[in-house]
Every structure is written in structure tokens, then in C-alpha cells.
Image (spheres, rainbow, N blue to C red):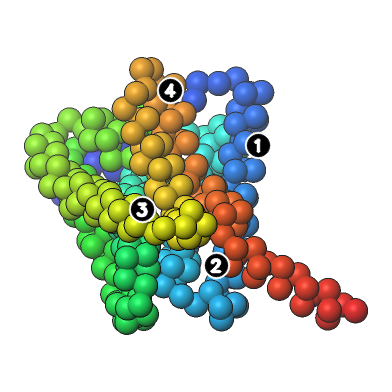
Amino acid sequence: MGGDGTNITSEPRFFIFAFSTSENQRLIILTVVLVVYLIILSGNLLIITLISLEPRLHTPMYFFLCNLSTLDILYVSTTLPKLIYVCHTGNHVMSYTSCLAQLYFSAASGDIESFLLTSMAIDRYVAVCFPLHYSLIMSKKVCVLLAFTAWFMSLVNASILTCLVHNLKYFGLVVVRSFYCELKTLMNASTSDTYTLKTTITVAAVYIGAIPSCLILASYIRIVNTVRKIKSSAGRWKTFSSCSSHLTIVVLCYGSGMTLYLSQTHEQEIFLSFMFVTLVPMLNPLVFSLRNRDITQAIRRRIDRRITRQV
């Protein structure tokens, strides 16, 4: 009781119970997570730098790729540093404010990724199906509008979800059976009625999950139909190869997300969740570098310029 007769209640704290491991196993996890985090940071920073410095890469596709790389850095920086801290110190406790902040940015990142992949699918659809009108349709204004919509709608949705979670009741030290404060885990750990939150999640899943997925699928159906009409096999391959990098990332993103539903145990769910968070951000730079001639040529030009300056 306080001096004025009111009850004093402390904010709940969250115990990040990701892995039940020994000291040696924790050191291995720390090393793996740190290496993965550094790979993601360096790879995506390389993509952002190349696109920013190379005028030839100032096109709609690379504009969205730059947004995606920026998002990937934000996404993993929301979750992995805390996991590294837990593995290093053995301190699994996270404050209420930190947990909500992690929830907000991770939820927003997942939504933004869905919208950006959809924008990239639309870009590839226009490039393949309407090549003569591509520059007119995918103008700078349209690209900025698509990117702004992706970030704005996702941040608004994340704000709503975070506010609803903030209104839930938690008591004492809450065990979070994941390596970060994700929505599903926090909802299950609460003692409050979660009907409103579940309804909001369902509605959000339609315009953030279902609608973008349908747009991506419809775009590639039209792309495949257009490619099939090209008479030469070399022409078909050249046209479809311009979409291969984006299609690979889409398959990785949605494929890794769907595997979460196949988990049978708590350990499997955490492992698959970790793969979902890290797989696309880690492979995104690699996929676009190896499967995209513009990126590889930009890297070579930068290397050649540096060698020339040194000589």
C-alpha cells in the first residue's frame, strides 16, 4: 500500500525462455546467432550502399530492394541483439517496455515485408506485361507511394496490436516461450480476455496476408502467361529470369512461414521461428547478388574503381 492508501503494482517482467541449454550449448548458440546477425548486417548494408551509389541501379526494382534491405536490418536488430545478450549473460529477464517495443517493431517488420514483396511483384508484372509503358506506370511518384503505403499501414497496424497487448493483464514474472516477445506468445501468456485482439489479428491477416498473397499469385500467373507467348526459348528465359530473384525470396518467405505450422514440439517451433526471422534477411542479399547481373556488375565496377585509385 502507498502512503495515500492506493495499491502499488509493479510492471510485469518477461522471462525469455527460448532454449533450455547448458553453458557450452549456450556458447554455441551465441556464436551462431552472432555470425548470422553480422552476415545479415553486412550483406544488406552492401546492397543499400551499392544501390545508393550506382546511378544505374536507381530503378523501381532496386528502390524496393533497398527498402527491403533496410527492413531486414530493422527486423533482425529488433530480435537478435537481445538473444545474443541472453546467451552471453544468462539474464533472461526483459522489462515490460522493452518487450512491447520488440513486439511493435517485429510486428511492423513482418507486415512491411509482405507489402514490399507485393510491390516488387507488381513491378515485375508491369515490366514483363507492359514493357513499353513501364517507365510511365512505375514512375518515381508511384514507387514512393507504394513504399509509403507499405510502411504507414504496417506501422499503424503494429500500433493497434501493441496497444491491445498493452491492455492485457500479466502477473509477476511471465514466461515467454520464444526467443523474442512475439504476438502469439504474449497473447497466450495473458490472463485477460483476448477476443478483441484475436478479432483484430484475423482482420489484419486478410489485408496484410491474404490480399498481398493473392496479388503476388495473380501477378505471376499473368507473367507466366505472357512469357509463354514468347516464341524463342532464349527470350522466354531472359524475360522470366528478371523475376527469378524476387520469386526466390517470395518462396523462401512464405515457405518458411508455412513450416511454422508443421512444428510438433516447443523446440521445433522455436527453431522454425528463428529460421523464419533470419532466413530471408540472410539470403536476400545473396540471392539478388548471385542471380542479378546488375548487382554483380555494380560490385565489379566498385572493385575496379578502387583498384584504379590505388594504382
User: How far is mark 1 from mark 4, CA to CA?
Assistant: 20 Å
User: How far is mark 2 from mark 3, CA to CA?
Assistant: 34 Å
Outermost right residue: 311
Give, as a three-letter code, the residue at label 2: Ile
> Circle 2 is placed at which residue position?
48
Q: Tell me if 298 is positioned left or right of 153 in this view.
A: right
Q: Which mark is residue 31?
A: 1
Q: Is residue 22 above or below residue 283?
A: above
User: How far is mark 3 from mark 1, CA to CA?
Assistant: 47 Å
User: How far is mark 2 from mark 1, CA to CA?
Assistant: 26 Å
Q: Disc 3 on helix, strand or loop?
A: helix
Q: Residue at x 41, y 58 (%)?
A: 231
In-front residue for pair 225/101: 225
> Circle 4 is placed at which residue position?
268
Give, as a three-letter code, the residue at label 4: Gln
Q: Nearer the viewer, mark 1 or mark 4?
A: 4
Q: Position of residue 97 (x, y in %)?
A: 34, 50
Give, as a three-letter code, the residue at label 1: Thr
> Circle 3 is placed at which residue position?
228
Q: Residue at x 60, y 57 (%)?
A: 289
